[in-house]
């Protein structure tokens, strides 16, 4: 007998096949299977580092050396990580014309590494460092090799060009994400706890514009019983692989 979740997967794949024009909104959960821990929950980054002490712009301005203690750990994890089957599956969906773009809250660069071409980095990225005093920019890899905390030529400690709490979302990313959210016919919400605004408002925007919302997460989130039409209660790697395969070659027995 078919497993009850099979029906949900088939329904999700049929929706994607019939509607196309999909966008994915991703969060830390999609990179967990690449060895990068999520922020919330057991073994999450925020269990080890209090975000008020390590992840706000105020904390960085007050004690950048301390905040670099956490940033160094993140950057090291990113440098070792490779895309997993969820990142690769989304890139394949884009190549096949099913997915139009990925809006990601992640700063690890794994969507691009997987081959996704249209990636909107809602919270910036860790590729680049910026000086908050003279606005010089540097490639992270080069500067970090020189030592931690990395410094600008002017002597100030550099900040990764990612969004800390209390900082605005990059203007172009915000605008592009809103446009994509309103234009898509299906929104895949993958691996986000949907607790951080304004990213968590994106599914609402899509829903109001008539999109079908498919959530992929082993846990429930505030979206599950509000805006999600389908909840695939699976890890991203398994779920995206199954979906991608089912869209490409529908199982004739279904
Ligand atoms: P969270 O850590 O808040 O949530 C991760 C989500 O991924 C949870 O809902 C997990 O159930 C789910 N998850 C865990 N493993 C998974 C897997 N293998 N497959 C699929 N899902 C899985 O991460 P985000 O929602 O991305 O912002 O957090 C949003 C923002 O909060 C981050 O961008 C960061 C953080 O503070 C800033 O730093 C500004």
Image (spheres, rainbow, N blue to C red):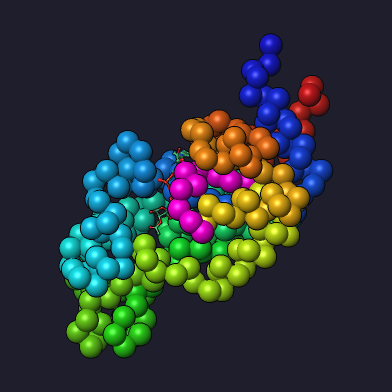
Magenta includes 192?
Answer: yes
Relative placement, left or right, of 75 versus 123 is left
Location of residue 136 in the rendering, given as x and y in whole percent from the top left corner: 35, 85
Magenta residues, start to end: 188-198
Picture residue at 39% right of the left edge, 51% below the top: 81
Residue nearest the observer in this picture, 226 or 11: 226
Relative placement, left or right, of 84 versus 73 is right
Location of residue 90 in the rendering, given as x and y in whole percent from the top left corner: 61, 49
| The image quarter in which residue 12 lies | top right
Quadrant where the C terminus lies? top right
The chief SS type of the magenta part is: loop
Location of residue 138 in the rendering, given as x and y in whole percent from the top left corner: 35, 79
Picture residue at 45% right of the left edge, 53% below the top: 196
Residue nearest the observer in this picture, 252 or 159: 159
| The image quarter in which residue 179 lies | bottom right
Residue 249 shows in this picture:
no
Quadrant where the N terminus lies? top right
| The image quarter in which residue 117 lies | bottom right
Picture residue at 72% right of the left edge, 44% below the top: 212
Q: Compared with residue 216, is residue 146 higher up or lower down, i.e. above or below?
A: below
Residue nearest the observer in this picture, 1 or 25: 25
Location of residue 105 in the rendering, given as x and y in whole percent from the top left corner: 48, 57
Residue 79 shows in this picture:
yes
Relative placement, left or right, of 219 versus 214 is left
């Amino acid at each position: 007998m078919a497993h009850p979740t099979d029906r949900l997967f088939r329904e999700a794949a049929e929706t994607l096949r019939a509607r196309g024009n999909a966008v994915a909104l991703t969060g830390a959960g999609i990179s967990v299977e690449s060895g990068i821990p999520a922020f919330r929950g057991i073994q999450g980054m925020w269990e080890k580092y209090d975000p008020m002490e390590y992840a706000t712009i105020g904390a960085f301005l007050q004690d950048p050396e301390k905040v670099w203690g956490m940033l160094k750990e993140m950057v090291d994890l990113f440098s070792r990580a490779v895309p997993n089957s969820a990142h690769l599956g989304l890139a394949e969906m884009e190549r096949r014309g099913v997915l139009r773009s990925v809006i990601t809250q992640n700063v690890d660069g794994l969507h691009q590494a997987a081959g996704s071409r249209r990636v909107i980095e809602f919270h910036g990225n860790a590729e680049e460092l910026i000086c908050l005093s003279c606005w010089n920019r540097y490639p992270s890899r080069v500067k970090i090799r020189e030592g931690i905390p990395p410094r600008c030529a002017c002597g100030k400690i550099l900040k990764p060009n990612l969004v800390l709490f209390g900082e605005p979302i990059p203007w172009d990313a915000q605008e592009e994400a809103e446009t994509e959210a309103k234009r898509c016919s299906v929104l895949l919400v993958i691996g986000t706890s949907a607790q951080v605004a304004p990213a968590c408002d994106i599914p609402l925007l899509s829903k109001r514009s008539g999109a079908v919302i498919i959530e992929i997460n082993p846990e429930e989130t505030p979206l599950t019983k509000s805006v999600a039409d389908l909840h695939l209660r699976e890890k991203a790697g398994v779920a995206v692989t199954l979906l991608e395969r089912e869209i490409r070659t529908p199982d004739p027995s279904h």
